Amino acid sequence: MGKAGRDWGQIYSIYGVDDWQTPIFLLIHAIFFSILSVLFLVYFEPICYFFQHFLPGPSAARFAAGFTGSVTALSAVCLFFAAGNIFYSAVSFHWEMAQRMVNAVSDWSSVKHALDLGCGRGILLNAVALQLKKSGSSGRVVGLHPTPTRSLSTLRTAGLEGVQEYVTCRSGDPRRLPFSDNYFDVVASAAFVHTVGKEFGQKTAAAAAERMRVLGEVVRVLKPGGIGVVWDLVHVPEYVKRLQELKMEDIRVSERVTAFMVNSHVVSFSKPSQHFMGPYEVRLDWRLNNLC
């Protein structure tokens, strides 16, 4: 079976689940509400009798008991769906989206330096490395994550995928990338940028400024003509607006897909080459000094 056509069991066996507490929490509550809804069904008449102590008449009591039981059953279904969606999104769907992201780059054979921003367990990182290997490129991909202890587990998955020679991991602040200007041919990031600045609250201006700072760093480290690909949750419209302000070219937004119970999109763009007007070179400033 090809790398892109794996079954979900193989993917989970390599990468595991990072935030397993959330789907387990949802699953426990789904089971609880399921049991509760069954009890409403089995003991409907006694429950109606109980409601009669608080409501005027048996009809109102039966309606209240039926409504409560229906809401309980519906809550169980929603919780089961949420747990399943988050579990699926965490790895299997993440792998699928990684394949879509690498397909946004038309020629991997010419890529010498690539960056996976917020590499996590290495799903996108290894997808890029596999693409470099497949294309016969001599390039390398760097996985950067703000957590220093992440590197060893990420490199382990690269070893399992057989691409360890294409992969390097390091820790760093995504708002101040430890790389020089115009260094990478490709910068990619999967379900990470929205987490930056979350300590300020997702909907605050401070959090938005931090996300824009990360986006500015992505543009800064891209070579002229380089490709950026970002799959992220909720905030993609503001990324598109900022990329337009930074004069990026060929900005494309994918159709909406649901991941982690929210809307998500892939936005891809290219950094324009330097332009000349007469004898004077026009340089674009990618930094976000005005957001400091």
Image (spheres, rainbow, N blue to C red):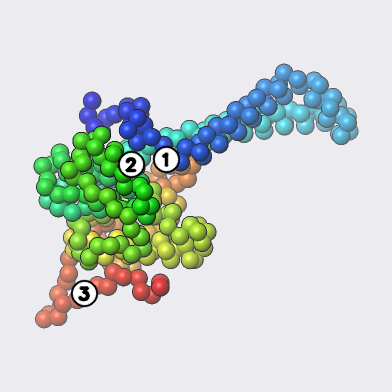
The amino acid type found where label 1 is placed reads: Asp
Report helix, strand or loop for mark 2: helix
Report helix, strand or loop for mark 3: loop
In the displayed structure, 85 sits above or below 252; it is above
Which residue is at a point 11% across and 81% down the rendered structure image? 279
Question: Which of marks 1 and 3 precedes in the sequence?
Answer: 1
Asked if marks 3 and 1 touch (Cβ < 8 Å), the reply is: no
Is 235 on the left-hand or right-hand side of 243?
right
Residue sitting nearer the eye, 173 or 197: 173
Q: Which residue is mark 2?
A: 153
Q: Residue 100: x and y, percent? A: 28, 42
Residue 124: tell me if it is visible.
Answer: no
Name the front one of labels 3 and 1.
1
Which residue is at a point 27% across and 30% down the rendered structure image? 5
Mark pair 3, 1: CA separation: 42 Å
Which residue is at a point 27% across and 42% down the rendered structure image? 155
The amino acid type found where label 2 is placed reads: Ser
Question: Which of marks 1 and 2 precedes in the sequence?
Answer: 1
Report helix, strand or loop for mark 1: loop
Q: Which residue is mark 1?
A: 18
Q: Residue furthest bottom?
A: 279
Which residue is at a point 28% across and 39% down the rendered structure image? 156
Question: Which of marks 2 and 3 precedes in the sequence?
Answer: 2
Q: Residue 198: x and y, percent? A: 48, 57
Q: Residue 211: x and y, percent? A: 40, 61
Q: Residue furthest top?
A: 42
Q: Residues within 10 Å of mark 3 (few under 14, many from 20)?
A: few
Query: Where is the N terminus found, in terms of image quarters?
Result: top left
Q: Which residue is mark 3?
A: 283
Mark pair 2, 1: CA separation: 11 Å
